[in-house]
Image (tube, grey):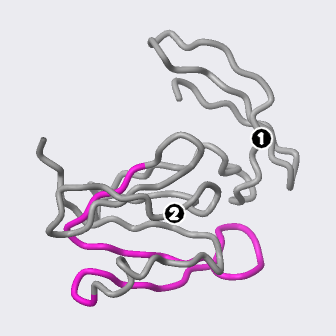
Amino acid sequence: MTIERRTVEIILEPRTKIPDWIAYQDLNVEISKMQRPGAAGPKLMVLKIKHSDAHFYPGGIVAVVMPGSENSYIAFDRLRVLEIRYGTGKSRTVKKNNYLCRRCFRLEGKMISYKPAKQVCLIDAVFICKWCNFQYELQSI
């Protein structure tokens, strides 16, 4: 199986521990901070890894494929990663954590209902944010 290598930015909650096996990759890893969009409070951490890949797994767990490796390893537990940004410039794509509130940008979402989606093994779900009470729907998750 071929893994697509690209620049990956992982947006993390403040005070998230970055595993040593990622942090010690001096040539391919940059760690910075950014302000939470539309909200005050502690700055979010941004982990940028070149020639890498990352994916969400059920429950919000994130696995990372590091440069020079063909295997993915669990890097972050649930409710630590807000979103993963793939690529740079105009070709950038973003995958948001299902529990990420679209209004306050916090990992406070709670699934309140769901129904089977049109696609096999997927669901359409309704979430509500425990922080700001915003309700949002995600399809085919």
Residue 102, horizontal then vertical, whole percent: 67, 49
Identify residue for label 2.
Answer: 76
Question: From what the image shows, is residue 2 above or below residue 5?
Answer: above
Q: Residue at x 60, y 75 (%)?
A: 16
Q: Which quadrant would the N terminus be assigned to in this image?
A: top left
| Image position of 10 (left or right of 69) | right
User: For the magenta stretch, what is the residue range?
Assistant: 26-55
Nearer to the camera, 136 or 110: 110
Badge 1 amino acid: Lys
For residue 95, above or below residue 43: above
Q: Is residue 66 above or below residue 40?
A: above
Q: Secondary structure at mark 2?
A: strand
Q: Secondary structure at mark 1?
A: strand
Q: CA distance from mark 2 to mark 1?
A: 19 Å
As drawn, 121 above or below 58? above
Neighbour tally class for label 2: few under 14, some 14-19, many 20 plus, Cα within 10 Å: some
The amino acid sitting under disc 2 is Phe
By secondary structure, the bulk of the magenta-drawn segment is best described as strand
Q: Residue at x 56, y 69 (%)?
A: 12
**Which label number is shown at residue 110?**
1
- Observer-side mark, 2 or 1, equals 2
Left or right of 1, for residue 50: right
